[in-house]
């Protein structure tokens, strides 16, 4: 939730009558009066009420934290605030209280309005554990949110779903909660809010995480400066991929091992490689593209080694780089040992691509970006060649003008492909 509202100023309109004020505004005076003892008693030297928790640790009683805790458990703000005020009035003259006493007070005040609310509050501090085949562990919002991101929804919306799931689990009577129960609940909420495809992707990804030991390797090609590295990082975050590399790193290592005299095109940028070609370019061929391809073929040797290493280690990986050229990599080579997906990141709007490079020229890495600007025509020609190759070899093209949309496209493609492979590998039932 945004915190921008904390900076809002009250309206200076002093002509409003009390009857014209909203309920919140009308109640503000009473709330401020109730809160006044907190401020003035501290000014007078009176210490805060201290809370002894179940481990014997003391902490100050804070109504704001109690309100937040109650709203997280499903109470609307008005009810949470009212209960916290009643609890405060009961304990504010005490030097000490305990979490046990606070729970009893919360249950007492909630029961005045609803027995169901009382049951909800008595379970407010319950440890929520999850039971699975591999053991029992505390419920984790972060772990669940990562699984939901693979359904192809925005992080903000994924967190909203997590809150709804946790609230439902805490209101339920089952302890510990089973992993299957969470999956069923999550699938139902996703289908209700975002449609069947989102629920299907969630279940597909959960199956992959728990039952498929082959690593996922996402390859993102694209011309210089198009934004493929940012896309790779975002995709990796959504798919919980810990290893993110660039072919630039592979090329840097190879430059140390292979001399400039032996492979001169390796020692310059992709859009400058044509300037280091040794032989003449055949008639009808674009020297910019030929230099780029010669460099890419050299770097592809190291790239294959990096992919093989990740597969051997069983590590999921996202790899981006201009040297990932359609036609130079046959992903079927790894299909028995890993799930390798090849996509091309592109910005086909030259004005947009140019603007992106201009923006980068004013930030970090400005010197490299200035070189991009000076070689913009060569960069565009390389992208055109990559696009033609992608069409020829059936490599999906991802529009990177909108990073959020591009990440959604890649995640949806990867997870949908995992689902199709699972269906193809599952024996048909008679």
Image (spheres, grey):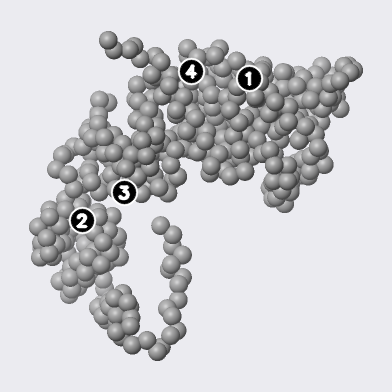
Mark 1 or mark 4, which is nearer the start of the sequence?
4
Question: Judging from the image, what secondary structure is the residue with disc 1 in?
Answer: helix
Locate residue 285, reporting x and y percent: 84, 21
Within 10 Å of the Cα at label 4, are there few (<14), some (14-19), or many (20+) other Cα atoms?
Answer: many
- Mark drawn on residue 108: none
Mark 4 or mark 3, which is nearer the start of the sequence?
3
Question: Judging from the image, what secondary structure is the residue with disc 3 in?
Answer: helix
C-alpha gap between disc 2 and disc 3: 25 Å
- Residue drawn 76% across the image and 35% down it: 380
C-alpha gap between disc 2 and disc 1: 63 Å
C-alpha gap between disc 1 and disc 3: 43 Å
Mark 3 or mark 1, which is nearer the start of the sequence?
3
Locate residue 173, reporting x and y percent: 14, 43
Q: Return the residue at label 3.
A: 163
Q: Return the residue at label 2.
A: 53
Q: Return the residue at label 1.
A: 393
C-alpha gap between disc 3 and disc 4: 34 Å
Kindly report which numbered mark, 2 or 1, lies closer to the viewer in this rendering: 1
Dots 2, 1 in contact, CB < 8 A: no
- Residue drawn 17% across the image and 44% down it: 172
C-alpha gap between disc 4 and disc 2: 49 Å
């Amino acid at each position: 939730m945004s915190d921008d509202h904390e900076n809002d100023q009250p309206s200076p309109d002093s002509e409003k009558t009390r009857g014209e004020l909203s309920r919140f505004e009308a109640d503000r005076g009473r709330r401020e009066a109730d809160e006044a003892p907190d401020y003035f008693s501290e000014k007078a030297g009176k210490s805060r009420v201290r809370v002894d928790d179940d481990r014997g640790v003391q902490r100050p009683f804070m109504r704001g934290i109690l309100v937040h805790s109650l709203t997280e458990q499903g109470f609307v703000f008005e009810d949470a605030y009212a209960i916290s005020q009643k609890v405060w009035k009961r304990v504010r003259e005490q030097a000490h209280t305990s979490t046990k006493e606070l729970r009893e007070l919360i249950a007492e005040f909630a029961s005045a309005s609803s027995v169901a609310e009382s049951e909800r509050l008595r379970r407010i501090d319950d440890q929520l554990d999850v039971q699975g085949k591999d053991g029992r562990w505390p419920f984790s919002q972060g772990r669940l949110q990562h699984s939901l991101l693979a359904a192809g929804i925005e992080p903000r919306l994924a967190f909203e779903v997590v809150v709804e799931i946790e609230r439902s689990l805490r209101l339920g009577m089952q302890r510990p909660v089973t992993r299957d129960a969470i999956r069923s609940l999550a699938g139902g909420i996703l289908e209700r809010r975002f449609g069947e495809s989102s629920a299907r992707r969630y279940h597909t990804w959960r199956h992959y995480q728990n039952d498929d030991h082959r690593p996922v390797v996402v390859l993102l090609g694209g011309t210089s400066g198009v934004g493929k590295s940012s896309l790779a990082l975002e995709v990796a975050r959504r798919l919980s991929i810990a290893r993110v590399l660039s072919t630039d790193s592979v090329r840097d290592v190879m430059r140390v091992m292979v001399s400039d005299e032996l492979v001169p095109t390796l020692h310059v940028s992709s859009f400058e490689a044509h300037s280091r070609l040794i032989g003449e370019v055949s008639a009808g061929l674009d020297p910019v593209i030929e230099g780029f391809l010669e460099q890419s073929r050299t770097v592809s040797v190291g790239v294959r080694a990096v992919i093989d290493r990740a597969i051997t280690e069983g590590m999921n990986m996202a790899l981006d780089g201009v040297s990932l050229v359609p036609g130079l990599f046959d992903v079927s080579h790894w299909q028995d040992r890993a799930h390798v997906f090849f996509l091309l990141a592109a910005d086909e709007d030259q004005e947009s691509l140019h603007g992106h490079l201009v923006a980068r020229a004013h930030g970090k890495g400005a010197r490299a970006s200035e070189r991009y600007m000076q070689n913009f025509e060569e960069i565009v020609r390389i992208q055109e060649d990559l696009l033609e190759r992608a069409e020829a070899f059936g490599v999906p093209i991802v529009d990177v003008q909108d990073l959020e949309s591009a990440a959604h496209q890649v995640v949806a493609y990867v997870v949908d492909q995992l689902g199709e492979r699972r269906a193809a590998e599952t024996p048909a039932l008679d």
